[in-house]
Amino acid sequence: MIQVKDKTFILFLDEKTIQKRITEIGNQISRDFENRDPVMIGVLNGSFMFLSDLSKNITIPTEITFLKISSYEGEKSTGIVKNLIGLDSELKGRNIIIVEDIVDTGLSMLHLIDQLKKTNPASISLATLLHKPEALKHNIQLDYVGFEIPNKFVVGYGLDYDGYGRNIPEIYQLKL
Ligand code: IMP
Ligand code: MG
């Protein structure tokens, strides 16, 4: 058990389990995007650790960039997605791979995919480490999913509770 601010969390996914799955996804993306010159877009802040480890398992040439959006405050979605840092890459005709920490309601990805479509890319794919199927409210295509998890709040491995817990190398689930 660990404590992050005022809440207690229980171990849910250990480092070895996470890394093994990321290697599999990396191999799959490397096969699927061979000769397609993909651009991986990490969604800040939560995806920094996933993108870091995932990119080390990509064996084909790939561009890597980031953008920043925010919809969460504390442990709840606000229902409003804010653009905090925009894109600096030319995406027209490119094969985009969005790299996200978690798809919860799907609102953030719906909003982002809509925006990215306006840049006329060749394709948009989505890789997310975590997905809460029970929380999904929007019709989003999830191309690469690390783990489907129950609808409970999690921290660690990039995911935060009120800004804390991102540096924890494992994923922990809120103790109720
Ligand atoms: P959505 O827009 O509801 O899909 O929320 C997606 C964003 O909310 C993710 O990119 C995370 O940053 C954050 N989020 C959703 N669920 C959790 C969680 O269990 N722990 C930490 N952050 C979460
Ligand atoms: Mg996020």
Image (cartoon, grey):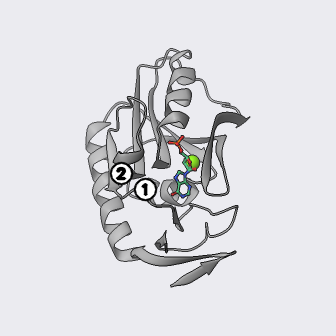
Left or right of 129? Residue 69 is: right
Task: From the viewer's side, name the closer residue of 30 and 118.
Answer: 118
The 10 Å Cα crowd at callout 1, few under 14, some 14 to 19, many 20 or more, is many
Number of numbered callouts drawn? 2
Residue 105: give its label.
none
**Circle 1 residue:** 54
The 10 Å Cα crowd at callout 2, few under 14, some 14 to 19, many 20 or more, is few
**Residue at x 60% of width, y 23% of height:** 90
Task: From the viewer's side, name the closer residue of 70 and 35.
Answer: 70
Left or right of 112? Residue 22 is: left
Label 1 beta carbon within 8 A of ligand 2: no
**Circle 2 residue:** 59
Q: Position of residue 24 (x, y in %)?
A: 27, 57
Secondary structure at badge 2 equals loop
- Residue 31 appears in which quarter of the rendering? top left
Please determine whether, in this image, residue 111 is positioned above or below residue 10: above
Which is nearer the N-term, disc 2 or disc 1?
1
- Between circles 2 and 1, the one closer to the viewer is 1
